Structure formats: structure tokens, C-alpha cells
Amino acid sequence: MKSVMNNRIWLVLFIAFSLMAPRLISVPYFLHLMILALIWVVIAQGQNLIQGFTGYVSIASAGFMGVGAYASTLLCLRVGLSVWEAMVCAPVITALIAVFVGYPSLRVKGHYFAIVTLAYNLVIFIVLNNFSSLTGGEGGLTNVPRPEGLSIAGLSISFEGREAYYYLVLGAAFFTTLICALILRSRVGQVLLAIRQNETLAQAVGIETWHYKLFAFVLSAAFAGLAGALYAHFIGFLNPEPFGVDQSLNAILAVILGGSGTLSGPVVGAFLVVALPEYLRVADTLRLVVYGALLIVTTIYLPRGVVPMLVAGFSRLMVFFKRNV
Amino acid sequence: MIELVQQIFNGLAIGAVYTLIGIGLTIVFGILGIAHFAHGVVAMSGGYVAFILIERFGIPFFAAVFLSMLAGAVFGILIERIAYRPVQNAPPINAFIIALGLTMMLDGLNLLTFGPDQIVVRTPYTHVYNWFGIVVTELRVVVLSCTAVLLLLMWLFVSRTKTGRAIRAVAQNRGAATLMGVNANAVAYVVFGLSSALGVAGGALVGAMLALAPGLGESLVIKGFAVLILGGLGSIPGAILGGLILGVSESLAAGYISSSYKDVIAFAVMIIVLLFRPEGLMGKK
């Protein structure tokens, strides 16, 4: 009971802070980073769905993010849809592609699934780089528009500034986290956890596991696609570089660092993977090395991630206080 | 027709390298159950070592490759001990994530040490022959024969020596092998040493035939896994067949479709095999 109360307090504090953040943060660059971190929350929640819940490590998040980003941008620039329409279409297009590629890849398990998805990411990256007539190749696409202004109840909101965009991505991050929470509590979520724990057993009790795996894979791709669209319309310039395999590894790192299979883990992990490179900026050349070392050390010593460790440490501290104070 | 044969020959030489990389992965996966994703970047680092030995110390090509294979073997053993051993009893995906971490680290270190530019491992084999209109470079012949010799040696080691028998015993049943007095940890060292040495040979040959550059390790290891998936897990003949098919299909795709999409074709072949024969071409049902 006590811990539920504690959790609620933390949640309320967190929501209050995230709503107030644009007022509290005076440096524009920090707000920029906050927006990126919230976009990463969307990706990490998707990655957690397939990696943390289902136990299938997909290395294609950045690729799907790229699909979403390019889909949304091209729908705006070439087809002439409004940004809002394009942003809704982008995750749907990404999900459709994920259905096609997910079906064959889910025939293999464990490492092989990881490798096949990695191959997808490479293919997407190659296509983005070489299909120049559509994607602009390495040079990329410029002038990706920001979402059009809205007027709700006589109040007009312009998304040209960072502040309004912050609330947009905050909404997206909450939305995806909420979906994950709902899934986790539903039968589907329980089946996904069962697949992670023992897929053979799940099949033996009559569950068509591949339906559920495909669902998790496609939804995670759709989240990545949404994140990609949010990213493209925020940065305003699009080239294939942020959608390479190393960014997919970043998504995995976010889930592992935060705590895979938890709801709050990916949120913490997303903020960590955006904040870490900023701290490591002094040693930019060493960034990869430090990242790799972090991944190894976390997997060996903190296999459950930062959040469960903090929770365990916190409750131990509370017990200690109760006994001694 | 001549162009077709030419492309197939070129593809065989590349395929031989993929086989070398793929065999290392197959034995590590088949015997220890680890998806050693860092294999490609280890192979690359070995290629760099060979490059340094040749350029700085003036060591002849074969001696340099041999020395870098030894260094690779030691490095492989260290990786097994430091990185993989601690997660031996954890879920297998942890080992894979560690492998990803190793890949990032080694890639970063290679970038820091050798810079972002491409390098080519120099060899004295620069003759070009012309057989019935097919251009055969001496280097490709050297690559193919090196691969054949290494595979033969490995086969002799695994099938004719006592250590080889221990390796096969652990592959069949780790628990039973341990009960029969086989030191499974020592077998893990041997397997990693062997696999890394073969990988390094592959890396040096790629460096001689094409070039070495940061990031190549990842594409090499993915090709290696594609070989595994094509050929069937843990099957050595499968790895040879898979490597050659991959190399040839890539070369044909580059020749007839587009060289920038050749990797896409290679992965498409892999995915088609997965769809229709998930256990691989030579794998058991």
C-alpha cells in the first residue's frame, strides 16, 4: 500500500515537472534536449514492447524511425498533405511495412531474429541513401515544415516555437506510455510476458504466439515511425544519418539502462541516452567506446537496469529508516 | 556468358571470405550457443594488425597474416573470459547485448587508432591472368586457396585430434561431456581462439582484396550471420555453401542490377531462404 502511494506521489511530481518544464528551463538548448529525450521515450517504449515484454531484441528501431520520418516528410512535400495528416499516416505506413517484414523474421528466434532485423535496418539505410530521386540521398531533404498552427476555443497555438512543440512530444510520450501500460495489464500483455518467459510452454497451452509477436513488433515499429515523424518536423532537415544501426543500438541501450520490461525504465533510459552524449561531449571520439563499455558493464552487473535497482535500493533505505528511526 | 562466369568467379573469392567469417560464427554458436556479434569487428581489427605488421615492420604477407591470426586467437580468448563468461548462465540475449557493446567499443577504438580513412593491406600478388577471356587476379586465387587450406586444417583439427574430439563432445552435450572429464571452459577458450583466428584471416584477406574501414566489421558479421542462416546453424558444410552462394549472388547483383544495392540483394536471398527453409539449406529439420 505504502509503495503504491509512493509511486503515485512520484508520478504526480513527474507529471507536474514535465508540464512546467518549459517555464522552468530557461536555456533554449536544454528545452531542445528535453524534446529529443521525449521523442526517445516514444522509441524506447516501442523497443521495450518487443525487447522488454516479448523478449525479442529487434535492431530495427532506427530504421523504422527513418521510414516514419521520410513517410511523413514526403507526404507533406510531395503529396501536399498537412503536417497533422502526415504525422498520423507515418506510423500507419511504418506499421504496414513492419507487417510485411515482421512475418518472415518472426519465424526465427532469439539471436537470429535480432540479426534479421539488423539486416532490415541496413536495407532501409541503404535505400534511404541511394534512392535519391525520392529521399534526396545523403544530401537529404530541407525545409521540412513544422505542424500548422491550431486554434482551440479561440486560443491559437503556433508550433514554430519550441514550447508548443514540447507539449506535442510530451503528449506523444504520455500516449505511448499509456498504451504500453494498458497492454501490459491486458491479456495481450500477459501473453507477451509468457512468450518471453517460455515460448514453448505458451504454444503448448494453445496460444498462437506468432500473432502476439507480430502485434508487438508492428506496434513497436509504429511507435518508432511516430517518433521519426516527430523528429523530422522538429529538426526541419532530414538525411539518412540518424537512422543507422548505431541509433538502433541506442534504443536497445535505453531499454537496458532504464530497466527492460518495466514501464518507467524506458522513460529513464531515454533521458539517459540523450543526456549521456552531452556529458561525454568532451570526449566525443571516445563516445562509442564509453557507450560500448557501459552496455557491457550494465549487462553484467545491472542486468535489470537502473530503475529496478533504484527501487530496490529505495525500499531497502525505507526499511532501514523504519527500523532505526 | 563470359561476363557471367567472370562475375561468378569474383563472387566465389568474396564468398570464400564470407565462409571464413561464417565458420567462426558457426562453431561459436554451434558449440557454445553464443551469437558472437563482435566477430566481425575482431576480424577487422586483425586486418588492421596485419596492415601494421606489413607497413611498419616490413613482415611478408603470409607471416603477417599468421602473426595477426595468433594475436586474434589470444584476443578471442580474452573476450571469452572477460566479457562472455560472466553472463554464461544468464539468458542468451544478454550475451548478444554484450557482443553489441563489444562491437561499439572495438569499432570506436579502431576509429581512434587507425583513423576514418580506408586502408588496403598490401600484397605482392598483383599478377593478372587471362584464362579464355576471364580475368583472374592472382590475389583472388591466393584468397581462394588460403581459405581452402585453412578449412582443411580446421577440419583435420576438429576430426582427428583429441582436443577436436572434446570440442565435438561439448557441442553434442555439454553436461555429459563435463561428466566424462572434458573441461568445458577450456573448450570454450579453444573454440574462441580458433574462431577468432579464422575470422582474422578473413579480415586480412578482405583488407587485401577490398579495403578496411571503420564500420566494415558490422557489415562483415552480418554477412557471416547471413551465411549461417543460409547454410543452417552449426553446419560447417552449410557455412561453406552459404558463403559461396552469398558471395556469388552479391557479385551477380552488383554486376547486373546495381552495386549500391548489392547488400540488399544479399539480405533478400537470406530472407527468402528463411521463408521457405527456416532451418537453412544444409540444416537438420
Image (cartoon, coloured by chain):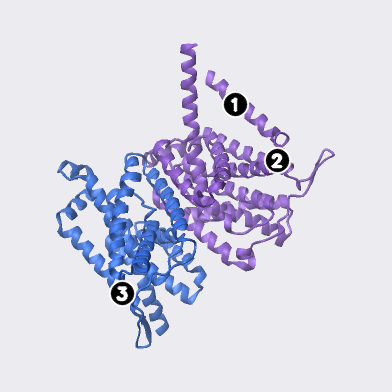
Query: What element does badge 3 sit on?
Result: helix
Q: Are marks 1 and 2 in contact (CB under 8 Å)?
A: no
Residue drawn at x 42%, y 53% is B106
Q: Is residue B36 left or right of residue A98?
A: left
Which chain is represented by purple in the image? A
Q: Are marks 3 and 1 on the same chain?
A: no
Query: Does any portion of residue A178 appear in the rendered image?
Result: yes
> Which residue matches tag 2?
A27
> Which residue matches tag 1?
A10
Q: Relative to A66, is B256 above or below?
A: below
Question: Which quarter of the rendered picture does the C terminus of chain B lie within?
Answer: bottom left
Query: Does any portion of residue B231 appear in the rendered image?
Result: no
Q: Earlier in the sequence, mark 1 or mark 2?
A: 1
Few, some or many residues within 10 Å of mark 1 (<14, 14–19, 20+): few
| Quadrant of res A150 | top right
Cα separation, mark 3 vs mark 1, equals 66 Å
Which chain is represented by blue in the image? B
Cα separation, mark 2 vs mark 3, equals 61 Å
Circle nearer the viewer, 2 or 3 = 2
The residue type indicated by label 1 comes to: Trp
Residue drawn at x 35%, y 39% is B90
Q: Which mark is residue B142?
A: 3
Residue drawn at x 58%, y 46% is A223
Q: Are marks 1 and 2 on the same chain?
A: yes
Q: Chain of mark 3?
A: B
Circle nearer the viewer, 3 or 1 = 3
